[in-house]
């Protein structure tokens, strides 16, 4: 047993930390730290900076432009990015579609699409969920009917994250209505400029615009945009969902959140005393910290296993369940720490700190509400329990 | 980074697990665990011959292990078998003797039985609260007071006693025959003793022993956490097996999602508990040992209670019986929270680290 990084890994950590210190623009890190929504320009600027360094497509093989990192290196990179308050990489092109095309795409598709993901020419979004197909994704109804060299798509997708910035969407569509639910689905690439597509914003609980719904009315797409075989899209969908599991625990984000809530609790006063000296509040922080400390090791154990076995195991669902619940607990603590100062509605008062309280109060309640999503998306925590029931308990 | 056990430790774990599986069956365990002396002297000797005690001490102290991972390997195997032998007493004593620079060959061979008399009724966890009094008498010292919950004390030859000397907590060696030792079986099996001291002759080992005792307790906490991980794993495995076999409403109860998800939640907590135990073991010789030990003991306290209660509930009535092994695992899992600091005590220790920052 040895919990420490190797000398090479420590050197890599130093390299990443140094590069971030020199290259992460302050205005972007400040925006991430403030916890509000990032502008499209900021996300593109960060994307371009990482691309110029060759650290963008961390999940791609070297021959396609990836850096060739081990799972541990990827973990170190993500951890350092969190520590420096770098933005999250927009994952839809890089971590979802990219690996799918590398595994299932034709050479022509790879050559056309992958470079445009890297250089930022295309912004991809995800067309998976539908109003009637959430956890039961295979019940999706959006259908594509073959007409000569084209598919004609009709239906509706939803929860399309950052679709408002995208010019492309990858979709799961039903191509065989008579087959079993999982066997009649295909994976199709669609240009959002195609006539018949309408994207509408969904306003989220905290007021933000992060997700959208997308309507397809007689949308004509070349058959050449099919990825893999027709009616084999479910295999691709599962591959996509299981491919990139490092980082699923969100340990770096929870470490960020823990430091933030501690800093808040040192600043906030209840009478003469600091909130962090209130035993009830301190106990809640300590318990979350203990859970997170265990999570860090659970995460490393699974990374180690992934590195030894070449692929992450089904137990990564544990990371999703625990990781999201711990992060949500920390966001809950940050909101509570502020007391009444958490109440001003960001964007609806000129200054989020208008009442009183610490300068970083503004977005805490909003982030708490927004983060309720994490136990729902990416396979809800209940779906993760179903997966563990099958794979680990074999019941 | 490497989460594999070294070959030596893997061999020790396998040897011990095989021995306990063959020789310390649950039936045998239950036959000895609840009646004084609450252990099996012949098996104690055999386990010592297998090296279970040598693994607890460093080479400098005459052993061949002594790190956090040596301790956790031994105790995880003990936990899986629900072994009631007083190995915790040997571990605590070995650490204290090491700190005192005293010889411990008798302890490591298993020939001499030691127990650490640290707790008192009004000082169950925090050594700073110890009231038992020491005073100089002639060339030596005498102790007066009462030590409580002395694990392994029911069969100890020698007691290592924490007592107050000139305002400091000091450590003394007392021959058990010189004290009044009232042994008893514990509700979860295994034995302990109340020790009454009344001008009892004692040999001073360490005059200012707070740090040494805290370090020994940290090692004991790693041991208890690993023991709990072993016991939790077995309780969970047994529960999941039972879910496959037990039929109600015409189907195995393992087909019910409400039970599946609860079994998954047990698994998740066990993995988290295993992780924090690994962390505490890795940090045992570092300067943050107490903080990580407290983190581990807090999490273990929560996880072990959940696993115990859920294992009983998901089995139903059968796990309420003395005959069914899970009931004994459940008792051990709940009651080890009462040893070396409970969930709340250790949470408050982690808290105070944050509050002072």
Image: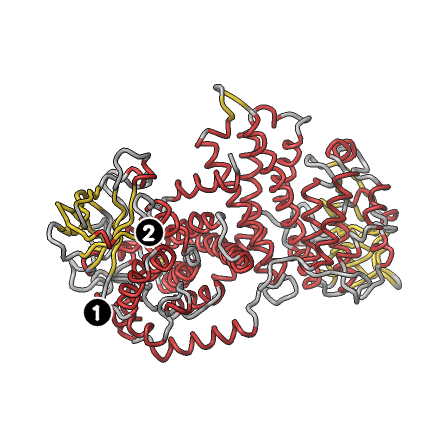
Looking at the image, is A177 positioned above or below residue A150? above
Residue A131 shows in the view:
yes
Residue A26 place in picture, x, y as percent: 29, 75
Q: Kindly state the secondary structure of the residue where label 2 is placed.
A: loop
Q: Position of residue B242 (x, y in %)?
A: 58, 29
Image point (36%, 49%), residue name: A236
* Residue indicated by mark 1: A41
The answer to whether residue A343 shows anywhere in this view is: no
Is tag 2's residue or tag 1's residue first in the polypeptide sequence? 1
Vertical placement of B83 versus A254: above or below? Answer: above
Foreground residue, A227 or B44? Answer: A227
Q: CA–CA distance between discs 2 and 1?
A: 33 Å
The answer to which image quadrant residue B84 occupies is top right
Q: Quadrant of the N terminus of chain B?
A: bottom right
Q: Residue at x 81, y 47 (%)?
A: B47
Total numbered circles: 2
User: In the rendered image, which residue does mark 2 sit on?
Assistant: A228
Chain bearing tag 2 is A
Extreme residue in the front direction: A148
Rendering coords of residue A58 (x, y %): 39, 66
Q: Chain of mark 1?
A: A
């Amino acid at each position: 047993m040895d919990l420490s990084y190797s000398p090479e890994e420590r050197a890599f950590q130093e390299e990443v930390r140094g590069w971030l210190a020199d290259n992460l623009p302050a205005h972007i890190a400040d925006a991430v730290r403030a916890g509000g929504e990032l502008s499209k320009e900021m996300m593109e600027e960060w994307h371009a900076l990482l691309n110029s360094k060759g650290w963008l497509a961390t999940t791609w093989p070297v021959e396609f432009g990836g850096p060739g990192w081990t799972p541990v290196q990827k973990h170190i990179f993500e951890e350092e990015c969190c520590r420096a308050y770098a933005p999250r990489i927009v994952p839809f092109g890089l971590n979802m579609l990219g690996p799918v095309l590398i595994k299932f795409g034709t050479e022509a598709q790879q050559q056309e699409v992958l470079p445009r993901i890297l250089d930022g020419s295309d912004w991809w979004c995800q067309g998976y969920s539908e109003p009637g197909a959430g956890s039961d994704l295979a019940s999706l109804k959006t259908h594509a009917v073959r007409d000569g060299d084209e598919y004609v798509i009709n239906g509706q997708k939803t929860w399309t994250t950052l679709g408002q910035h995208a010019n492309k969407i990858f979709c799961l569509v039903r191509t065989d209505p008579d087959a079993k639910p999982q066997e009649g689905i295909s994976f199709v690439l669609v240009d959002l400029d195609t006539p018949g597509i309408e994207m509408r914003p969904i306003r989220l609980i905290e007021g933000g615009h992060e997700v959208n719904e997308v309507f397809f009315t007689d949308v004509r797409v070349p058959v050449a945009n099919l990825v893999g075989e027709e009616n084999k899209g479910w295999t691709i969908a599962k591959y996509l969902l299981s491919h990139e599991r490092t980082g699923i625990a969100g340990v770096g984000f929870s470490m960020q959140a823990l430091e933030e809530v501690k800093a808040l609790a040192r600043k906030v006063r209840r009478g003469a005393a600091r909130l962090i000296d209130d035993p009830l509040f301190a106990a809640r922080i300590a318990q979350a910290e203990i859970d997170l400390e265990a999570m860090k090791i659970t995460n490393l154990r699974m990374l180690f296993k992934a590195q030894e076995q070449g692929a992450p195991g089904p137990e990564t669902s544990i990371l999703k369940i625990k990781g999201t619940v711990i992060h949500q607990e920390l966001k809950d603590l940050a909101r509570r720490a502020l007391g009444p100062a958490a109440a001003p509605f960001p964007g609806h008062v000129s200054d989020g700190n208008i009442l009183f309280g610490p300068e970083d109060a503004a977005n805490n309640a909003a982030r708490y509400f927004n983060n309720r999503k994490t136990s729902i998306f990416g396979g809800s925590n209940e779906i993760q329990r179903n997966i563990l029931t099958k794979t680990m308990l074999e019941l | 980074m490497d989460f594999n056990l070294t070959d030596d430790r893997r061999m020790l774990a396998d040897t011990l697990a095989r021995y306990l599986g063959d020789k310390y069956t649950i039936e045998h365990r239950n036959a000895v665990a609840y009646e004084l002396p609450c252990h099996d002297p012949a098996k104690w000797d055999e386990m010592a011959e297998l090296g279970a005690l040598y693994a607890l001490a460093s080479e400098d102290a005459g052993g061949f292990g002594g790190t956090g991972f040596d301790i956790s390997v031994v105790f995880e195997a003990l936990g899986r078998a629900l072994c009631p032998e007083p190995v915790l007493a040997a571990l605590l004593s070995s650490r204290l003797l090491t700190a005192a620079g005293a010889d411990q060959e008798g302890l490591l061979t298993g020939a001499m039985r030691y127990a650490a008399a640290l707790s008192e009724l009004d000082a169950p966890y925090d050594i700073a609260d110890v009231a038992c009094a020491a005073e100089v008498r002639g060339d030596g010292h005498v102790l007066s007071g009462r030590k409580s919950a002395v694990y392994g004390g029911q069969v100890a030859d020698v007691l290592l006693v924490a007592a107050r000397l000139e305002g400091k907590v000091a450590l003394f060696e007392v021959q058990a025959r010189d004290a009044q030792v009232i042994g008893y079986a514990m509700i979860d099996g295994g034995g302990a003793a109340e020790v009454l001291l009344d001008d009892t002759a004692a040999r001073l080992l360490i005059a200012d022993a707070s740090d040494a005792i805290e370090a020994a307790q940290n090692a004991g906490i790693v041991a208890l956490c690993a023991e709990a991980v072993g016991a939790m794993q077995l309780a969970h495995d047994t529960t999941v097996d039972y879910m496959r076999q037990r039929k109600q409403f015409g189907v195995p109860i393992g087909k019910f999602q409400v039970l599946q998800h609860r079994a998954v939640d047990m698994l998740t907590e066990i993995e988290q508990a295993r992780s924090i135990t690994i962390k505490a073991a890795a940090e045992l010789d570092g300067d943050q040992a107490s903080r990580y030990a407290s983190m581990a003991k807090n999490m273990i306290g929560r996880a072990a209670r959940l696993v115990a209660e859920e294992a009983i509930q998901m089995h139903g009535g059968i796990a309420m019986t003395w005959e069914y092994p899970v009931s004994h695992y459940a008792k051990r899992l709940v009651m080890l929270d009462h040893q070396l600091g409970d969930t709340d005590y250790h949470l408050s220790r982690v808290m105070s680290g944050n509050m002072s920052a």
